[in-house]
């Protein structure tokens, strides 16, 4: 776990993708997800039709899935109808990690 959690919850004005909320909730519960959040171009004006959807995932302690994360990424690609790039905060470059974590938009957070 990183020192800085994913905490941003302010909704962007509008998103260029549809969020399948119930499917996301089910996905997160099945995969022991603590936080799932959007980041990158999907939250900015430069998102295009051919852009992928960048998603951050933070797992419950002791529940990191290893190689199953590839299957999870494929499942999210199906849910969103766009290619998904699924990353954990630890996989982000230290040069922009704090900015990404502060700007990420939370889709799911375990209460």
Image (cartoon, grey):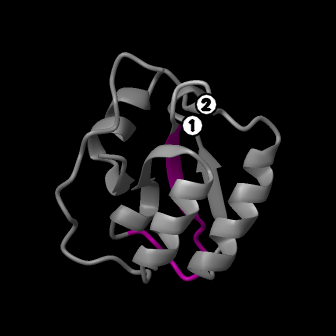
Residue located 61% across and 30% down the image: 91
Is residue 72 shown above or below 96? below
Rendered location of residue 25, percent (x, y): 45, 65
Query: Which corner quadrant of the image does residue 12 belong to?
Result: bottom left
Residue located 60% across and 77% down the image: 79
- Can residue 86 be seen in the rendering of this structure? yes
The image's mark for residue 91 is 2
Query: Which corner quadrant of the image does residue 52 belong to?
Result: bottom right
In the image as oriented, which residue stretches furthest toward the top? Answer: 3
Magenta region: which residues?
46-58
Reading the image, the residue beneath label 1 is: 88
Residue located 46% across and 23% down the image: 95
Residue located 57% across and 37% down the image: 88
Contact between marks 1 and 2 (CB within 8 A): the answer is: yes
Secondary structure category for the residue under label 1: loop
Rendered location of residue 107, percent (x, y): 37, 60
Q: Is residue 48 on the magenta stretch? A: yes
Q: Nearer the viewer, residue 52 or 68?
A: 68
Is residue 47 shown above or below 5? below
């Amino acid at each position: 776990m990183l020192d800085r959690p994913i905490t941003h919850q302010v909704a962007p004005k509008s998103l260029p993708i549809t969020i399948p909320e119930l499917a996301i909730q089910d996905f997160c519960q099945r995969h022991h997800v603590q936080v799932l959040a959007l980041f990158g171009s999907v939250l900015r004006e430069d998102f295009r039709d051919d852009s992928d959807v960048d998603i951050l995932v933070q797992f419950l302690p002791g529940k990191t899935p290893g190689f199953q994360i590839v299957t999870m990424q494929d499942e999210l690609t199906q849910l969103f109808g766009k290619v998904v790039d699924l990353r954990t905060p630890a996989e982000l470059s230290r040069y922009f990690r704090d900015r990404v974590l502060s700007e990420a938009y939370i889709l799911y957070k375990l209460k």
